[in-house]
Amino acid sequence: MTPFLTVEDLSKRFDGTVAVADVTLSLVRGELLALLGPSGSGKTTMLRLLAGFETPDAGRVLIEGDDVTLVEPVHRRFGMVFQHYALFPHMDVGQNVGFGLESIGVRRAELGDRVARALALVDLAGLERRRVDQLSGGQQQRVALARALAPEPRVLLLDEPLSNLDPTLRERTRREIRDLIRRVGITTVLVTHEQDEAFDLGDRVAVLRSGRLEQIGTPDELYAAPGNRFVAGFVGRSSELPVTVLGPTEWGTRIAVEGVEWEIERPAGHPVMLPGPALLLVRPEALRLGEDPQAIMGTVTARRFTGPSALLTVLAGSGATIQVAAPPAVVRVGERVGVLPSRRAAGGLHLFPSEKA
Amino acid sequence: MTRRGNEAIGVPLLLAFLVWLVLYPLLLVLVEGVRGPGGWTAEHLREFLGRSTEMVALWNSFWISLASVALAALLGIPLAFLLERYDLPGGRVLGGLVALPAVLPPLVGVVAFLFLYGETGFVALLLMRLFRLEEPPWRLQGAGAILLVHAYSMYVYFYLLVRAALVSLDRAQLEAAASLGAGRWRTLRRVVLPHLRPALTGATLLTFMTALGSFSAPYVFGGGFRVMPTQIVATRLNGENQLAMVETASLAAMALLALLLFRSGSTASGGGRKGAGPVRIALRSRVTRIAAGLVSWGLAALLLLPHLTLVLVSFVPVGTWTTEPLPPAYTVRNYFALVEDPVRVRPLLNSTWLATVATLAAVGIALASALLSARRSTPVRRAIDGLLALPWAVPGTVFAIALATAFSVRAPATGRLVLVGTLWILPLAYLVRNLPITSRAITAGVRALDPSLDEAAASLGAGRGRTLWRVTLPLLRPALLAGASLAFVTAFGDFVTSIMLYTYDTRPISLEILSSLRQADVGVAAAYGVVLMLVSAAVFALGSGGQGRGNAG
């Protein structure tokens, strides 16, 4: 498919600090892309560059081949939902939602109808005359969504859409947003620092760090084949263990870790690692408890209940801690256990060159 | 036009305008003071330094201002504590009444004091009758009289600022102190007072500057006791214009010095309150309750006496009240005279249009400067801020002289026009005097706006004009009303700049009050005073009413 929204070599600095550096990515029509990154990673700047609130130092933003890089926000027709919603406090719900419709010249006769439709879309039918400050946080957010969607923008931008809701509301709202965007079929870019949100909402996820695009892909791809240590660590839970690469084997790499030897599968296309120090990232579910000569021995220092399995923290002899997912009932804090790769560990163990700090 | 385009043109224009209006006249005063017909001269400076009367006036200005601060603090701080920390009978009503001196414009307050405590006022006449005295027991004159008026009108600064700070004190801080074993005194010293420090510094500065620039009280009650503002007027009446310039410069210097001194001593308070406000302390014993109630209501009555006096005197027919403790006859004629007699209506209309024009202009300039760059901090922005605030730091007399100097010469090439003697000098003077308060209120309003509202409007396709009209201005309404009401009230009751710059055709209410008094027409003078008082109160209510609605919305 041809790209609908394209970002080419986009860069932005503020007073000498890089906020966004050479980011290139594209979305097909109707796709939902989540920009994921820790605070300061440039994800909000990316969104503001897309909206036109910031002008890039270099690079272009294209929509269906049209260069809109220098188009003012007023004329860009990108809808935006702000982190704190930015609802106009002196207008009621209907006036808020109608504001953008008036901009595009919707006539008064039609206005009420369009507002009602937009509100129905977010399940707030009939609340036109409600004051904004009489709404709950979740309702305010839906009004913000309705307001952004009402003028039928070309692209929808969401800035941390769930960060202002209390945790019990988040899951439900997340589902509602996803369904709504699917139903409307609008091309959407959302910014979040929560991996859960990005994975749940995004068709694809772009991981940003210090303004650079580290990796972009579907949630499955990112989880199973993180391109580097940062992505692996940022996406999902994992433990880091210093290891020594001993050499390649038939289907992977032999390493020495905590005094034992493990064999790690090498993903297709990854280069063979040279012998020497390296870093192993392990997902808790890629490990199991067991008695084996090749098990790392350690003491359980903490046990967290997470539902179907317990999350154990195991302190190994070298002082490294390893998180292991295990059936809830098997061990108690203080017990000695052995840890070894699960038989179905494919994708949960990642070997990276060790970075010199 | 783009936002950047607007700023590129607007900001330099604004800066140039403010330099011309605010800074330039002041600089001219400095220059004129050291220039003679034959070039530069230190003659006037030497004369100033050589005359003992000059030094005495300068010293008087200084110590009167300090003493005013002390008295105002002594009255205002305890009142704030009493009304905010203790649960008094009728405390809410009382809290409002106590702030009422704020609705008396300076000259009106002085006139009320004259009727009340003057040698032919109610109190003196009553005492003469009671004790069969031949002479009034005192003369309301000199430093004592000035300080009395100052304490009365300026304690409000301490009262309001300290009370607001007490309200903002987090209850949990007091509870934390108590749970850490701190007694009442230690809590006061270590928790409450540090919290109040910014309010105390602010009130001190405000009182000192107001007292330093105070003109009405020294003008009416000073007699032979001169402070610098009255000295300047006297010097000008003597025709010694250039000496007046040196005096003006010395007063301005003292004001700026005081400002620098207090500014460096003040620190911003850290953050707003998160938790609940302190609980009022209940007075348990009946005796203390009654005693506290009596004291505070007695005090409130004392504070309200000038207002009541004014109202009472406004019903006195001309020439009927001489030696009786209470006026023997009453009439509403005085009020009719204000609207029927064309000569008497004129000042009311004058003050109304002068204050309206000045207020609109001040609001316009303050709004433009706030919108153009309130959220940035650039050297140009700081210069604009400084110029907007400068008139506050400079006593009214100084500005009157400065404007009279700058705008009495026709020299368009150097930015000087003849405005003195025209209709336009008074609105211009009021405008300059109003810029600080108006721009402070409006800038605060603009800073409090969520910048993403602007962006939301833009992303919804609204251009600059529509965003301003539909989003920014409606949200700024409380700030605009607050700024405008302060400006209007100050201009409407202005005396200090008016007395130097008015013409017969533009004579404002304050000057008509003065001339009515000179003609011994106390009833009409008081009636004007009541009008000023009521309009001030109404406009204040309008301004703060808008604020209240804004917070709710």
Image (cartoon, coloured by chain):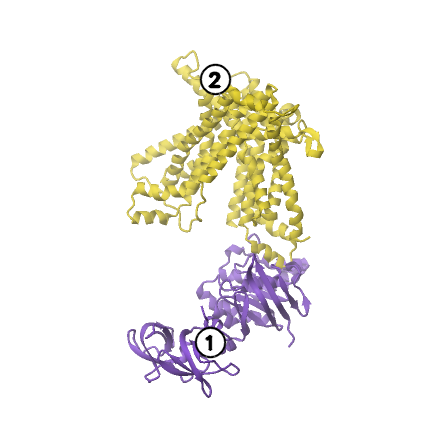
Chain colours: A purple, B yellow
Q: Are marks 1 and 2 on the same chain?
A: no
What amino acid is labelled 1 in the image? Answer: Phe
Q: Secondary structure at mark 1?
A: strand
> From this viewpoint, which residue is outermost toward the top?
B134
The 10 Å Cα crowd at callout 2, few under 14, some 14 to 19, many 20 or more, is: many
Residue at 54% x, 48% y is B447
Name above or below for residue B445 compared with residue A257. Answer: above
- The one nearer the camera, A13 or A117, is A13
* Residue A221 location (% of width, % of height): 52, 77
Residue at label 2?
Answer: B120
- The one nearer the camera, A279 or B85, is A279
* Residue B169 location (% of width, % of height): 40, 45
What amino acid is labelled 2 in the image? Answer: Thr
Q: In which quadrant of the rendered view does residue B137 lie?
A: top left
- The one nearer the camera, B440 or B7, is B7
The 10 Å Cα crowd at callout 1, few under 14, some 14 to 19, many 20 or more, is: some
- The one nearer the camera, B235 or A181, is B235
* Residue B317 location (% of width, % of height): 55, 19
Name above or below for residue A338 compared with residue A27. Answer: below
Residue at 61% x, 71% y is A26
Badge number at residue A352: 1
* Residue A291 location (% of width, % of height): 32, 84
